[in-house]
Image (cartoon, rainbow, N blue to C red):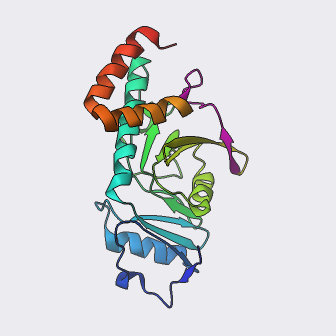
Amino acid sequence: MPLLNLAKLPITTLDVSPGSHLLIGDVTWEQYETLLADLGEERLIPRINYCDGTLEIMSPLPAHERPNRIITDIVKALLDAQGRDWEDFGSTTFKRPKRAGLEPDTCFYIQNAARVQGVMRMDMTKDPPPDLAIEADVTSKTTLDAYALVQVPEVWIYEDGRLTIYRLQGDGYQPSTTSSVFPNLPITTWIPTLVQQALSTGTSAMLRDLRRQLATELP
């Protein structure tokens, strides 16, 4: 996707309709911070990511939000069945000053849940990055590069009925068939199957079936 130029296309004039995905080049960190302030912290859309001078503006279609919420519910059910603590930080903005800023579809603190229980405003100079981020839409290289700079160890991307797990190795991500969060579970096959079950029979019915299964079969 070609980059737009911020100087020639003021962000305040953009009409970001559902399904839009824009990349804007030559954006300073200060311009990114100003845009976040102008849009406000309570907005749900558009989502804004920034990485080394490139600004990414996304307005997902409503159809993309459903898998995201379903996967979030599945993750919570799995963690609860294993008796593990977690904190859901949703689309909280995470920043590596001057380099990257991102807003996941959903993110979880699991290994580091106890460290962020009382945190209301994230400060990446002292707070850890999320242990798991979930994206249920087209995610560009800009987004993954931003995740790498923030040092999120694992990112799940759900697209076209498939789940891909990316695990951080060095400065970038590598696809993986296993999850470090759930190393003994077939996550890449379970998640798509459960999402389709939720869309067919209803999310609450799927979750009840899943919890019954987990009560007897979870490793």
- What's the residue at 32%, 35% (across, down)? 200
Q: Is residue 12 magenta?
A: no
Residue stretch in magenta: 172-187
- What's the residue at 33%, 20% (across, down)? 209
Q: Is residue 141 left or right of residue 127?
A: right
Residue 150 picture location, percent across and down: 58, 53
28 up-or-down from 138: above or below? below
Q: Main secondary structure of the magenta part?
A: loop
Quick one: 186 or 200, which is closer to the camera?
Answer: 200
Residue 77's image quarter? top left
204 up-or-down from 153: above or below? above
Residue 59 picture location, percent across and down: 38, 65
Residue 79 picture location, percent across and down: 43, 25
Q: Residue furthest front?
A: 200
Judge whether residue 87 can be spotted in this image: no
Instruction: Give the total number of marks visible in the rendering.
Output: 0
Residue 9 picture location, percent across and down: 46, 87
Q: Is residue 178 magenta?
A: yes
Q: Is residue 127 left or right of residue 72?
A: right
Q: Residue furthest bottom?
A: 8
Residue 98's image quarter? bottom right
Judge whether residue 123 can be spotted in this image: yes
